[in-house]
Amino acid sequence: MKKLPLGIQNFREIIEENYVYADKTQFIYNLINNAKYYFLSRPRRFGKSLLLDTIAEAFSGDRELFKGLFIYNSDYDFKKHPVLRLDMSNISNKTPKILERSLIETLFDRVNKEELDITSDIPSNIFKTLIEALSKKYSQRVVVLIDEYDKPILDHLDNIKIAEANRAVIKGFYGILKSMDPFLRLTFITGVSKFTKTSLFSEMNNLFDITLTKKYANICGIATEDLERYFTAHIKDLASGEDLGDYDRIRNEILTWYDGYSWDGRTRLINPFSLLSFFSQERFSSFWYASGTPTFLMELIKEKPASFLSLKNLVISERVLDTADMRKISVAPLLFQTGYLTIAERRIGAPETYLLQMPNFEVKEAFNLNVMAELTENEEHLAEAAYRKLQASLIACDLQSMLDTMRGLFASIPYQLHIACETYYHSIFYAIMNLLGFEIDAEVSVSGGRIDGVLELEDKAYIIELKYKDCPHDITREAKQKIFEKALAEGMHQINEKGYHKKYAGSGKSIYKVVLVFLGRDNIEMVVE
């Protein structure tokens, strides 16, 4: 049984030390023979670094290293080329000056190793001269590989001034590549985001973006059909124990937890980091999510809670996925680029559009829990305890218990975080329902209007209307109660008058019409019919 390459991004080590390797060399063969400048966006921990290392080895001249893989038996000549690789995740970027200095130090490490005569204190000039010198020294064109190109920007999205200053530095740095065409054999650039690509590479109009190209949809990750090709022995080994069940159950659970990523709407991919972590730890958990969630992403959702309500079955064009301004970042494209949404369906048209959904159980559970914890500023274990209580209450139809739990949850929202708008409370409630594993649809269209939420269980359906009303802090208890009563009556009247519940009549399920009224973080009332 081959070893598991968890955390190993070195192709040579994987092959020589008998680790599992999912063959991606056919994609590399196609890259080498079809174009010269490439860009690829994929989420973190999805195999980008290993891909670049494999490309580097393909240009090392060591054909035997690839024995048994697609490219070994192809007509690729394995001619040796100098490779210049930059991993921007290893470049310090706290300030633009530090970023420049770190780039200079990194480039001069290679300059000194090659014993080249280069004198400059401008990163782009050093980069340019180094490429020329390497090409001349080895009498071959140079392969340039840049990993995590956008990290100097992503690290500072909470400080736009630094992010823009860093962008200016790397824009000039990357910008020299187009002028180096006579000296370059291949240029391949990877990153997480695409929203900075246009401005960064505006001068590189020859860059081929393969992010959504069908031909390269599976270039990173483990294809669903390859799970058993590469990991049958590992699944059988786990099935021989008593903890996780038989072979079929383990396989199906793996797909539920970690499968579902797609960049063409057809082929499906398993998250490689989560899959390897599962086999290594022999348990199901949110490994990829736990490895780090961008702080700026959660801050953006806190600033724009209404955006969270529109994430289910979201249809978006490629232009919107590609377009973003650092000062006007949209939640949906960012969630797609960072791996929290994926393409469920590709819709041909003018323009072509994509149906986006959360890829799997790992992302769905962990993301919704994090949103709920962030919006209420509860620690995650407290948020999790709250939603477990809510789950039990809804299944048992103990709505008073549900109300009590929600009061405690919302009361924990700090005053400085509280946003006095209905969509803020909708967002938290929507996150809670998704966490419970229930398929709640926000803003469900029916003949009489749009329902705030529908929660369907096997034997019951909850028709939910949410209301938020402004309420002065110094109001009397009697006056507050009148506001509650009026809002509760309005909500129930709205459900009945517009017939929100009629869609579910005849389903055989018990129907509960529920109105929740929020007067603030610690004032919630409910009425049920």
Image: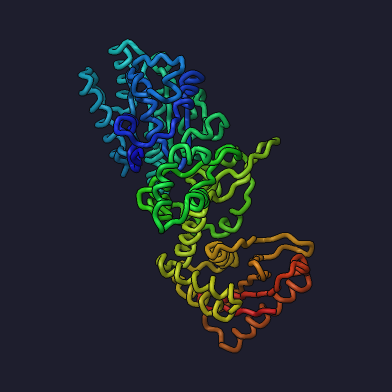
Residue 503 against residue 91 in the figure, above or below: below
What residue is shown at x 31% (from left), y 44% (from top)? Answer: 94
Is residue 73 visible in the rendered image? The answer is yes
Is residue 415 visible in the rendered image? The answer is no
Q: How is the model colour-coded? A: rainbow
Quadrant showing the N terminus: top left
What residue is shown at x 39% (from left), y 51% (from top)? Answer: 292
> Which percent across, then down, holds residue 389?
50, 74
> Which percent across, then down, holds residue 325?
51, 43
Residue 449 against residue 323 in the figure, above or below: below
> Which percent across, then down, holds residue 264?
58, 37
> Which percent across, then down, holds residue 465?
66, 70
Residue furthest bottom as drawn: 478
What residue is shown at x 63% (from left), y 72% (from top)? Answer: 467
Q: Nearer the viewer, residue 104 or 448?
A: 448
Q: Nearer the viewer, residue 253 or 158?
A: 253
Residue furthest front as drawn: 240
* Count of numbered marks: 0
Q: Quadrant of residue 130?
A: top left
Quadrant showing the C terminus: bottom right
